Structures are given as C-alpha cells and as structure tokens.
Amino acid sequence: MGKVIQIAPITRIEGHAAIIIHLDEDGNVADSKFHTMSLRGFEKFVEGKPAEELPRIVSRICGICPWHHHMASNKAVDGCFDVTPPPAGRKLRELMQIISHAEDKLLNFFFLAAADFVIGPDSDYAVRNIVGIAKANPELAAKVVKMRQMAKSMLEKFAGKAIHPVAGVVGGFAKPMLEQGRVEMLEKMHEILDFALFTMNFAKTQVFPKYLDTIQSLGVIRTGFIGTVDSKGALNLFDGKIRIMRPDGESTDFDVRDYSDYIGEQVVPYSYGKIPYAKFWNEGFSLDVDQPKGIYRANCLARINVADKMATPLAQAELEEFREKFGRPAQATLLYHWARLIEEIYACERALELLKDPEIRDTNIRAKVEPKAGRGVGCVEAPRGTLIHDYTTDRNGLITKANLIVGSTHNLGPINLSVKQAARTLIQNGKVDEGILNRIEMAVRAYDP
C-alpha cells in the first residue's frame, strides 16, 4: 500500500475543493483526483417559479460573478417569451457584464494568483498571499484595491447593486443611462484601462519572464477549447456563436440553442460536478492524462485561442505578441494568467466603446413582455468560462425545466488532468514538501475555478 496525500482546502480559489493524490509503494504518483462539492440544486428548485423571477434567483449561484448569471438568465427568459430587447437595453446589459469582467480579472491576478509569482511558489505560506504582496509593495496593493472598488462602485451606483443584481429585466433593462452618470463612468473606465495596461507591462517585464520554464512545464495538457466569437470571428464576451476548437486547431461554430448536440455531460463518482465533453468529436469521453477524449477547456485562455482576433486595438496588439511567443492554440495551463490580462484590456476597451455609443443613452430600454410557453437558451462568457442557461416554460410562463452549464464546470475535467500531470512531474520517489504541494495547487489556480 502506498501513501495518500490530501490537499484540503485548496487555497486562493473561489470556493471549496480538495486534491487527493495516491502514491505507489515507490512514492510515485499512481493517481490523483480533484474533488469539488459543486452541487447547488438550482436546476430543480426553480421549477414552478415564474420565469421572470429567475434572473434575480440565479444570481445567488455565485457571489463572485452574479452579473453573468443574471445576464444569461435574462437572455434565456427573453427566449422563452420570444422577446427582443431594444438596442439600448441590450447595450446596458453588456456594459454591466463587461465592467464585472474588468473587476473580476484584477481580483484573480492580484489577490489569488500573484503571490505565487511575486512572493514565490516555494516561499512560506504565511507570507505567500495578498497580505504578503501588500507588505512587499504597499503602493501597488493600494492601487489594486482602488481599481476594484472603482469598478464595483460603478455597478452599484448605476444598477443599484454590485452583487446579486436586479437591474436586468426580461425584455431589456430597468433604467436608462443618464448623461452625468455616463461621463462619470467614462472617466473611471479610462483610469481602469490605464491600470490594466500597467498590469500587463508589469507582468510581462517583472513576473512572467522569471517563470517561463514553469509556465511551459507545470500542469501542461493537450485539449480542445471553447469560447464565444462574433460574426467576424473576434472574441465576444456577451453574445455570438459558440466555437469549440480541437487540440489541433480545427474549430466548429454553432448556435447556443443547439449546445446539447455538441456538448455532453459525464457523471463521475468522485465529484458532484458533471464533466462536460465534446461529444460530436466521436471520440467518446476519457480523462486519461496522456490521451484525453472529448475534453476541452473554457475561460480566458480558451477564449483567446478560439478567437481569430480581438475586437479592440490594444487587446489585439497583446494577442499578436502572445501568439508570436506561444502559438495557437496555446496549451500551457499557466498561460491562463497571461490570457486573463489580455481580456482585462479588452474588457476596459469594450466598456469605453459602449459608453461612447450614443445609442446607449436612448430611453427605450425595454420591450413589452407577455409570459408564454417556450424555450430559451441564454449564454454569456463568464470569467470562468462559457455560461449556459436553458429554460422551458409552460403557457403561464412558469419554469418546467432548467439546465445550467456553469463556466467552472467546463474545466473540471481539465483541472483533473492538469493536477495529475503536475503531481506526476513534481512528486518523485516519495519526496514531497510544501513548495511541491503549492505548485500542484498552482495548476488549479490558473483556471480560477
């Protein structure tokens, strides 16, 4: 009998999970599992609810990304009731969602991931955290807090709530954009964009170069990818076609309403979270780390892999540099951190585009809605990945069926594979220490689950 190593809880992630590593008699990794208690039950307890209540209910699924559930849900109910929001209502929805993206990526990079790179992966865990970063660079820490607070305050001031929002309504949005508020938000978004550009430069010059060997080796697996693109193949975080890319770069686009023709969900005995896979590849399902079948990845690295280009100029320049260094599709797991900063720049640029669009000030922000029987599928790109809400209603507009594929769920399979690869690489002949275990955790943190 070998030894069992348990890492529980995994630190600096958004939620609760554990890693179980089984060693053989020689002290080498025989197997490993990523365990997550992700069951929430929303798909069942929303049955029988009036559909228009769901955008307010499902935002409680996640306190980190409630705006994305809120928007995907609104879009799904729009579909059930066969209603199309006016352009201004749609753009206000996207603006709130994109500002939430900008805030979230700063949270992940500085509060959760940066300590491994700035303080060091082998340093004492007592200082390998946001407090350690604050002590090492108090000026930078204060700036990070200010930028996150600024983004949150924009959401709260305009929409009433930064967390568990209610401003998105079926058929559009609850309030129009006034000129004074628009000007104030423009000023703040320019400041956040400047900080996003600083962060990218800081990471490329002072952080990532020190760890290129680690980036190219830790948790590296070969999978497909999923994300949303617009009609020109550019990344879009709010709307478009879903694109799944094979490991060799070949891709397939489809409408979100048809997702069940392309995506299957596999139950595994060691996790409450189902593992999605690309069933249309005709390869079946397998979590063999050396030859995974049907497995694809979501989130920022996946999105910039599947997109032909970025839709904004500064983000496009960063994507071109990224691809020159790492190719397409880039497979190194720790490159999620680099990709996340490219998306941060895109989110800021897109928010500015929306705020400068004259149409966003139109007071026609909501279409008339009549509850009816129907089916609607709403999809947005949440920070953690492609978020799908699928609802069916009866003639009274009550929910009869709901299915959700949450962003992190797409990555449950890949996380298992990256953890196993990292553990096999790092644990040899029974040698295990705190630094090795933290590096295995780093393979999980990259996905920001």
Image (cartoon, grey):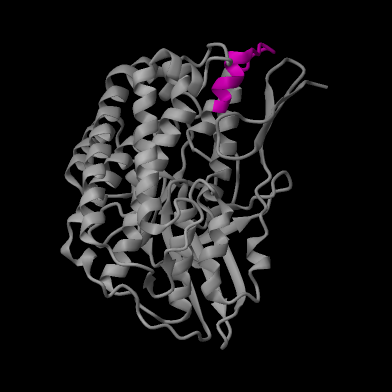
Q: Is residue 233 magenta?
A: no
Tell whether 144 sits left or right of 19. Answer: left
Q: Which quadrant of the rendered structure holds the N terminus?
A: top right
What residue is shown at x 67% (from left), y 12% (from top)? 429
Estimate the x, y position of residue 224 in percent, counting from the top left. Answer: 44, 46
Picture residue at 58% right of the left edge, 15% below the top:
126
Q: Nearer the viewer, residue 416 or 106?
A: 106
Q: Is residue 432 magenta?
A: yes
The picture places residue 54, in percent across and down from the top left corner, at: 55, 68
Front in this rendered view, residue 60 or 387:
60
Q: Residue furthest right?
A: 1
The total of numbered circles placed on residues is 0
User: Residue 200 vs residue 166: left or right?
Assistant: left
Query: Does the rendering let one see residue 249?
Result: no
Relative to residue 407, is residue 9 drawn left or right?
right
In the displayed structure image, the side of residue 21 where residue 414 appears, left or right: left
Magenta extent: 427-441
**Which residue is nearer to you in this view: 133 or 406?**
133
Q: Residue at x 20, y 53 (%)?
A: 353
**Eyeballing the image, is 436 above or below 254?**
above
Q: Residue furthest bottom?
A: 395
